[in-house]
Amino acid sequence: MKRQWPIEELIEQFTLLPKEQDLLTNKTGATRLGFAVLLKCFQVEGRFLRGKHEVPKAVVDYVAHQLTLSPDLWQAYDWAGRSSTDHRAQIRTFCKFREATVADEETMTDWLITDKLPSEPALDQLTTAVLARFQALQLEPPTTERTERLIRSAAAQFEQRLCAAILARLHASTCERFDALLTHSLRAEEDWEDEAAHEDTPASDETVTLAELKKSPGPVAVESIQGELAKLGLLRALALPADLFGVK
């Protein structure tokens, strides 16, 4: 949860509505304040926060002011006890949420692979998208650690499927040339200490390694031009389909 909340946002997001205040009729003191803070934070985030430290002071102060209670009571709220467990169950029921199941996580994985991972977003962007998706589906997400594992697993599956789809579109002769390139590259790495032998080898598409393909040309010179021509010859020899990376 973000740390800074302007008063306008506090009023919009954390004002206790009449039906929400009805949930507090049998609660007093720290229990009353704790339940109210837990409820409003859940409504905003779509999940229960991991600890009191994640709740901004401004939020506690604003909710306490509505209840005519001291914000100091927040520290006395039993965050991890049996009563807070009961409070979470009440809040889920009131908000019409349920805890995400293994089946829900599998559905989320499929959604990531189909809708999000093709655009290659960063991990923090994926996490935000996943949490928003769970909230829209009225599902309480797994723990932070489990959510991260879910995202990384989805990313791994996406990469495997993408590689398999690309490989399926390659001609057998192209695969053979790739195998030859990899074999040559591995041998070149093993022999790299023999600099003299390496320097005496003229540039050709048969001597280019995978590592050299990734290098920039460097300063313009006869050797660098020969090297770039060798790279171009190798890439042409691979005979990759023009629309190879348009796979879905």
Image (cartoon, rainbow, N blue to C red):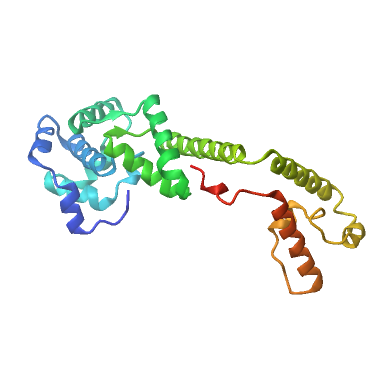
Task: Looking at the picture, tell me which residue is in the foreground, 138 or 247.
Answer: 247
Tell me where residue 176 sits by quadrant: top right
Say if residue 168 shows up in the picture.
yes
Task: Looking at the picture, tell me which residue is in the foreground, 165 or 2.
Answer: 165
Left or right for 188, reference 61: right
Task: Looking at the picture, tell me which residue is in the foreground, 38 or 248.
Answer: 248
Q: Which residue is located at x 74 percent, y 64 percent?
A: 228
Q: Which residue is located at x 79 percent, y 66 percent?
A: 226
Whether 202 is drawn above or below 41: the answer is below
Left or right for 15, reference 217: left
Where residue 243 appears, as percent x and y from the top left, is: 55, 50
Where residue 79 appears, as percent x and y from the top left, is: 30, 34
Left or right for 187, reference 133: right
Left or right for 125, reference 244: left
Whether 54 is drawn above or below 193: the answer is above
Q: Which residue is located at x 52 percent, y 35 percent?
A: 157
Where residue 242 appears, as percent x and y from the top left, is: 58, 52
Tell me where residue 162 sits by quadrant: top right
Q: Which residue is located at x 39 percent, y 37 percent?
A: 111
Where residue 213 appears, as percent x and y from the top left, is: 71, 57
Task: Looking at the picture, tell me which residue is in the foreground, 170 or 248.
Answer: 170
Say if residue 47 shows up in the picture.
no
